[in-house]
């Protein structure tokens, strides 16, 4: 029974070490999509509260209509998940003929 | 107790498997990717990316791509406009002018045609406009998606992602050409990108340059607006009135234009990240080569004007060239040699083990860190880049740029009309052509330009 318990403890330790190593490799693989939007939000979040107020949003170029559409829960703030959703929803394709060579 | 032991053994095996896959980053010698993606961010200047030394954090995904792949520090486009550049790139030839109907010359083999003749699946999702299929750029592609003119990656990336899933299920070698106009003017983008680098700016550059059609409306540092000038007035009077109504741009306005361009880069960068995410997600990371380029650059008021197709200096011709392929390319290398976008044609062919008979040089060996084994017939001995537009020709070496007028029809000779500039003067502000000590350099470069252009131009 003692041998069995030792084996169990060794396996638990091995698993813990492998998990730590795997997480480290995942971190080395770079940020995931949500982390990228957190970094983007960090660049424009003037007061550093982790959300964009209407004023912060408009100061960095967004329109009032975009803010209303992005603020999904109507709390007058755009958080990282709302910003990410808005990025996917807002179609940037411009009027043909505006771009030129 | 036995069940716990069995469970732990299974978890250990699973973790070891995941760890082995995650840690498997050793590049394979003689690597041959199953999928090659040519990713073009239209109008992207090299020097506005972090991996090319730009201080503003515009491009974290492209920077990461470069750190995991190979970056060519001195890559130059053959043309300063989209159609000229792509006519050259997709045919692997040097082109001075595109035809009046702007069609891809029907007598030239395209990269897609060559690859298709070897059984490679060829797919393109491009942003229409100057690359619309009506101009012939679809020649050789099995599928060519260009439904929206001047579109963003927002519209073009979904096709590429769909194809990634198909490639993951089908072993047939595939070439994908993905393109977006996200960085092309107008720089306006949804949400926070317009002024993320110039928060609160409300000057004259705001409405017109960042959100409207202002290209070529800025000249000599002044912003010209649409005028309803009386056509019956003499031209000089109309010019005088336009000048009087124009606005001199202050340094803050110039900064706002640059900030708008940089915000557009940050917008496009998120799509680059998502493409690479998807390559990993479908398990093609070690079978895929991504070649990121810009087709030409952009003037950002360094010389008083904004846009492109205006000059043959580094602002319009120095483009990013980054290759990412963890299966075969060791990360973090930088190549300093002068290379050209015309080299992309033989490089893509070479990665599929196809020999291309075009003037460019395959960069595969450089990308894989192997000794250079193939040299194109058009390449100068020291490594130089040829560029052209209807009015002029340019030669860029590691040290200098020479710009001349298009050859005179009567004599075929070249005349130095613009000048000679140091490579450390990318905006071409200080012309060295009149300096006696530079006469020999100018003569030598002119001779090289003439020789190279005669040997390769079609």
Image (tube, rainbow, N blue to C red):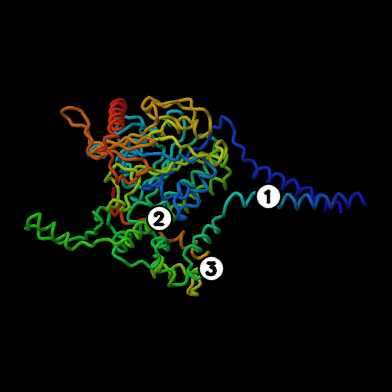
User: Is B329 positioned to the left or the right of B359 in the image?
Assistant: right
Earlier sequence position, callout 1 versus callout 3: 1
Q: CA distance from mark 3 to mark 2?
A: 23 Å
Q: Which of the pair B383/B431 is nearer the observer?
A: B431
What subunit carries mark 2? B
**Residue nearest the viewer, comparing B48 with A7:** B48
The residue at which mark 2 appears reads as: B262
Same chain for the residues at labels 1 and 2, yes or no?
no
Residue furthest right as drawn: A1
Q: Is residue B458 visible?
A: no
Residue B259 position within the rendered picture, expressed as x and y whole percent measured from the top left = 38, 58
Q: Chain of mark 1?
A: A
Spatial CA span between label 1 and label 3:
29 Å
**Chain letter for the residue marked with disc 3 in the picture:** A
Around disc 2, counting alpha carbons within 10 Å, would you say few (fewer than 14), some (14 to 19), or many (20 or more)?
A: many
State whether residue A53 is above or below residue B301: below
Q: Quadrant of residue B389?
A: top left
Tell me the residue that label 3 is attached to.
A50
Q: Is residue A1 above or below residue B96?
A: below
Q: Toward which corner of the image does residue B86 lie, by quadrant?
A: top left
Q: Read off the residue under disc 1.
A: A22
| Element assignment for label 2 | helix
């Amino acid at each position: 029974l003692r041998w069995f318990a030792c084996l169990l403890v060794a396996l638990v330790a091995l698993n813990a070490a492998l998990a730590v190593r795997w997480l480290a490799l995942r971190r080395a693989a770079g940020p995931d999509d949500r982390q990228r939007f957190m970094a983007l939000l960090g660049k424009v979040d003037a007061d550093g509260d982790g959300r964009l107020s209407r004023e912060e949003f408009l100061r960095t170029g967004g329109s009032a209509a975009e803010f209303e559409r992005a603020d999904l829960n109507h709390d007058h703030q755009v958080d990282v998940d709302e910003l990410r959703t808005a990025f996917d929803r807002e179609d940037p394709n411009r009027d043909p003929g505006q771009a030129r060579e | 107790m036995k069940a716990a032991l069995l469970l732990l053994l299974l978890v250990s095996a699973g973790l070891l498997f995941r760890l082995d896959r995650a840690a498997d980053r050793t590049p394979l010698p003689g690597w041959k990717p199953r999928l090659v993606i040519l990713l073009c961010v239209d109008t992207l200047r090299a020097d506005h990316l972090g991996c090319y030394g730009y201080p503003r954090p515009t491009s974290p995904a492209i920077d990461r791509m470069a750190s995991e792949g190979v970056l060519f520090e001195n890559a130059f486009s053959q043309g300063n406009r989209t159609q000229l550049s792509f006519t050259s790139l997709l045919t692997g030839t040097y082109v001075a002018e595109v035809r009046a109907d702007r069609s891809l010359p029907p007598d030239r083999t395209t990269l897609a045609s060559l690859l298709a003749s070897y059984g490679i699946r060829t797919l393109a999702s491009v942003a229409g406009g100057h690359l619309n299929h009506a101009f012939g750029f679809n020649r050789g592609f099995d599928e060519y998606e260009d439904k929206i003119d001047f579109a963003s990656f927002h519209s073009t990336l979904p096709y590429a992602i769909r194809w990634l899933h198909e490639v993951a299920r089908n072993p047939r070698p595939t070439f994908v050409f993905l393109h977006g106009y996200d960085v092309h003017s107008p720089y306006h983008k949804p949400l926070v990108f317009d002024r993320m680098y110039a928060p609160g700016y409300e000057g004259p550059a705001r409405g017109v340059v960042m959100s409207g059609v202002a290209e070529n409306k800025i000249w000599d540092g002044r912003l010209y607006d649409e005028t309803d000038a009386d056509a019956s007035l003499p031209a000089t009077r109309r010019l005088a009135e336009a000048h009087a109504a124009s606005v001199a741009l202050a340094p803050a306005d110039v900064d706002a234009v640059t900030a708008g361009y940089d915000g557009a880069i940050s917008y496009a960068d998120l799509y680059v990240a998502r493409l690479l995410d998807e390559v990993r997600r479908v398990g093609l990371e070690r079978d895929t080569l991504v070649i990121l380029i810009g087709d030409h650059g952009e003037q950002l008021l360094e010389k008083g004007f904004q846009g492109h197709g205006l000059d043959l200096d580094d602002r319009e011709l120095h483009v990013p060239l980054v290759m990412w392929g963890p299966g075969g390319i060791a990360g973090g290398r930088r190549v300093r040699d002068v290379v050209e976008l015309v080299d992309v044609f033989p490089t893509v062919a070479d990665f599929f083990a196809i020999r291309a008979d075009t003037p460019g040089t395959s960069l595969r060996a450089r990308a894989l860190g192997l000794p250079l084994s193939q040299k194109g017939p058009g390449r100068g001995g020291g490594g130089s880049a040829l560029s052209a537009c209807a009015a002029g020709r340019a030669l860029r070496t590691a040290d200098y740029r020479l710009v001349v007028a298009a050859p005179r029809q009567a004599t075929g000779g070249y005349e130095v009309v613009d000048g000679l500039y140091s490579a450390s003067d990318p905006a071409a502000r200080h012309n060295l052509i009149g300096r006696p000590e530079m006469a020999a350099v100018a003569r030598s470069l002119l001779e090289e330009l003439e020789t190279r252009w005669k040997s390769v131009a079609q």
